[in-house]
């Protein structure tokens, strides 16, 4: 088995890494940005679906919960906390920007490793 070349920072290639004249780094940047925006948009939609909109958008579940709490208050005289009726937001929907950023960084890191491996194979003649 042949070892790695001496210079691991910048393997020498005979031709540039490109896709139809566009550098591979530009393609990777565009892919990273596309994945980031797509994930962010999808998670923002999920965020809006789980968001609490108050009395302006009262869902049947929220109304039923408030009615049950009011019945309990009338029966026992102990006030209830209406915050318990608010919809529960999943973590990914509560923080869509950070999850989208994590997905974008993952694409960037995996793509950069792939570019490095491709250059190493080309420098060895594979």
Image (cartoon, helix red, strand yellow):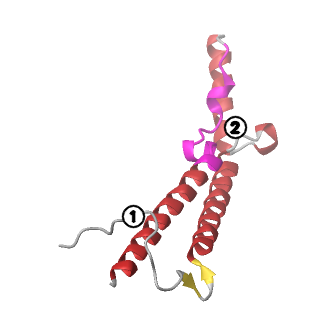
N-terminal of the two: label 2 or label 1? 1
- The percent coordinates of residue 9 (x first, y second) are 44, 63
Label 2 and label 1: CA atoms lie apart by: 64 Å
The quadrant in which residue 42 appears is bottom right
The answer to whether marks 2 and 1 mark residues whose Cβ atoms lie closer than 8 Å is no
In the shown orientation, is residue 74 left or right of residue 19?
A: right
Residue at 82% x, 42% y is 56
Q: Taking 15 as reference, is 53 above or below it? A: above
Which residue is labeled 2 in the image? 63
What residue do we see at 64% from left, 67% from top?
Answer: 34
Name, please, the residue furthest toward the right: 56
**Magenta-drawn segment:** 79-98
Q: Which of the labelled discs sits on residue 31, or is there none?
A: none
Q: Nearer the viewer, residue 78 or 25?
A: 25
> Where is residue 59 drawn, in percent x and y?
70, 44
The residue singled out by tag 1 in the image is 8
The answer to whether residue 64 is above or below residue 68 is below
Decide whether residue 83 is among the magenta residues.
Answer: yes
* Residue lying at the far top of the rendered structure: 77
* Residue 41 in magenta stretch: no
Which residue is rendered at x = 68% and y = 25% of the image?
82
Q: Most extreme residue toward the front, as rendered? A: 6
Which image quarter is the N terminus in?
A: bottom left
Considering the numbered disc 2 on the image, is that residue within a helix, a strand or a loop? helix
Under tag 1, what secondary structure? loop
Q: Quadrant of residue 62?
A: top right
From what the image shows, is residue 10 above or below residue 65? below
Q: Is residue 18 left or right of residue 40?
A: left
Q: Mark 2: few, some, or many residues within 10 Å (few <14, many ≥20)?
A: few
Q: Position of residue 116 (x, y in %)?
A: 44, 69
Q: Quadrant of residue 123?
A: bottom left
82 and 121: which is toward the camera: 121
């Amino acid at each position: 088995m042949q070892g790695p070349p001496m210079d691991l920072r910048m393997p020498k290639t005979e031709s540039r890494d490109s896709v139809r004249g566009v550098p591979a780094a530009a393609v990777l940047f565009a892919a990273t940005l596309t994945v980031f925006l797509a994930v962010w948009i999808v998670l923002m939609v999920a965020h809006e679906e789980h968001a609490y909109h108050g009395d302006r958008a009262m869902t049947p579940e929220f109304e039923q919960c408030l009615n049950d709490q009011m019945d309990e208050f009338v029966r026992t005289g102990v006030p209830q906390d209406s915050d318990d009726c608010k919809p529960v937001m999943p973590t990914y929907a509560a923080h869509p920007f950070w999850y989208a950023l994590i997905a974008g960084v993952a694409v960037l890191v995996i793509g950069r490793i792939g570019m490095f491996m491709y250059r190493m194979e080309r420098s060895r003649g594979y």
